[in-house]
Image: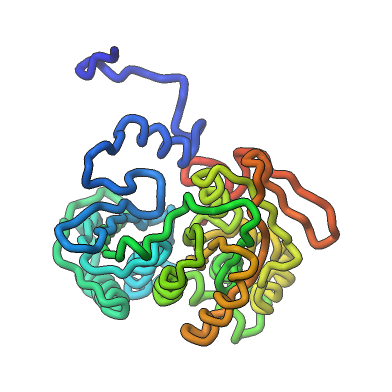
């Protein structure tokens, strides 16, 4: 048994060796959630807790760290405030819930202009009000050199409408809302101002990256049908987040790259940057679309519902497989790319992309 008071010492294993998701798995083993009030603990988009009311309580947090998630010169404080809210609301959306209350932990250099902070919080307030939530408290602390915003969001969902990652079934189709890849294209436009991109396309892509919109209405619509088996938001990249679903469900997947709903704006930016729009759509991340699974016969009705009620397109891009060891992409030319267990998606401590 490990002595809790012993010096932690030096370990040959570093965080970068196990990556973000390996670290989360390690933490989950150290912090088992056996309390009777815990419905879902570490491992899904959001923790799910029993509450005194008939609804479940949802709890999530996410942070934005200067020089990791954003560069201060490339995003306004109002945009940053909106962004940090949207990425948290997206987690609530992926569970079929709605946001309620938020806490903000702000860490900033003492030389930060007060007007910057005012605009940052105004962005948070504006974006959260759009979804029906409010900031109810938080904390402020000093940082020696960079800005960090840790946003904690609570929400609620009816038990009958709760959607998890773990429900995908072999034979399900894989569907995604909107146009994955747009945020990655927006990042390229932000980094490389000289790119010759259609001005309207550039504006669209920059907004998709700087001020993403959580698919809250879409998540609640999908949850209301009872036809969706599993869902996650596309934060780490389409392949990575589908892999999260399949690991939780004990299944594999196949994506048909030729079916990806890549927008003309994304294709134009990729051509200008000499990049690969298909790769951006598969693993770019930070799109905050919803990826979900359902029976093939349910797909047309789900597509009509999303289009008619939310004005949001959705596309069948793959299928769920029986074999959990099978993760593959059928490329547009018909070749098959089989993915190793460690591949794809943004990993904070890995080498798989990021800003």
**Residue displayed at 59% across by 70% down:** 298
Which quadrant holds residue 161?
bottom left
Q: Is residue 268 left or right of residue 15?
A: right
Q: How is the image coloured?
A: rainbow
Q: Is residue 303 above or below residue 147?
A: below
* Relative image position of residue 144 (x, y in whole percent): 26, 48
* Relative image position of residue 111 (x, y in whole percent): 22, 60
> Is 42 in front, or is 166?
166
Q: Is residue 344 above or below residue 226?
A: above
Q: Is residue 192 visible?
A: no
Tell how many labels.
0
Q: Where, quadrant-wise, is the N terminus in this rendering?
A: top left
**Residue displayed at 31% across by 70% down:** 98
**Residue displayed at 30% across by 65% down:** 158
> Is 187 in front, or is 316?
316
* Relative image position of residue 232 (x, y in whole percent): 48, 59
**Residue displayed at 61% across by 61% down:** 174
> Is 84 in front, or is 297?
297
* Relative image position of residue 118 (x, y in whole percent): 22, 73
């Amino acid at each position: 048994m490990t002595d809790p008071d012993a010096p932690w010492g030096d370990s040959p294993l570093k965080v970068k060796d196990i990556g973000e998701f390996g670290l989360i798995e390690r933490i989950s083993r150290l912090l088992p959630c056996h309390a009777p009030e815990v419905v879902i603990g570490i491992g899904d988009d959001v923790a799910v807790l029993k509450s005194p009311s008939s609804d479940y309580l949802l709890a999530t947090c996410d942070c934005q760290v200067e020089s990791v998630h954003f560069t201060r010169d490339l995003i306004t404080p109002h945009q940053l405030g909106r962004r940090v809210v949207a990425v948290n609301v997206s987690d609530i959306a992926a569970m079929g819930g709605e946001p309620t209350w938020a806490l903000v932990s702000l860490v900033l250099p003492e030389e930060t202009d007060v007007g910057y902070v005012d605009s940052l919080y105004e962005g948070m307030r504006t974006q959260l009000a759009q979804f029906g939530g409010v900031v109810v408290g938080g904390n402020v602390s000093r940082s020696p050199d960079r800005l960090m915003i840790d946003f904690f969001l609570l929400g609620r969902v009816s038990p009958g409408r709760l959607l998890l990652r773990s429900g995908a079934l072999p034979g399900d189709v894989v569907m995604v809302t909107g146009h994955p890849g747009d945020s990655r294209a927006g990042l390229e436009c932000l980094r490389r101002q000289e790119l010759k991109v259609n001005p309207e396309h550039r504006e669209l892509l920059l907004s998709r990256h700087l001020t993403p919109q959580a698919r809250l209405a879409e998540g609640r619509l999908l949850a209301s049908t009872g036809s969706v088996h599993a869902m996650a938001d596309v934060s780490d990249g389409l392949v990575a987040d589908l892999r999260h679903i399949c690991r939780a469900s004990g299944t594999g997947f196949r994506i048909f790259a030729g079916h990806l709903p890549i927008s003309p704006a994304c294709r134009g930016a990729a051509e200008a940057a000499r990049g690969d729009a298909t790769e951006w759509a598969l693993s770019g991340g930070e799109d905050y679309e919803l990826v979900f699974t359902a029976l093939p016969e349910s797909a047309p009705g789900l597509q009509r519902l999303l289009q008619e009620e939310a004005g949001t397109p959705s596309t069948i891009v793959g299928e769920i497989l029986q074999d959990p060891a099978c993760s593959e992409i059928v490329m547009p030319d018909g070749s098959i790319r089989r993915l190793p267990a460690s591949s794809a998606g943004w990993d904070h401590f890995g080498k798989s992309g990021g800003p």
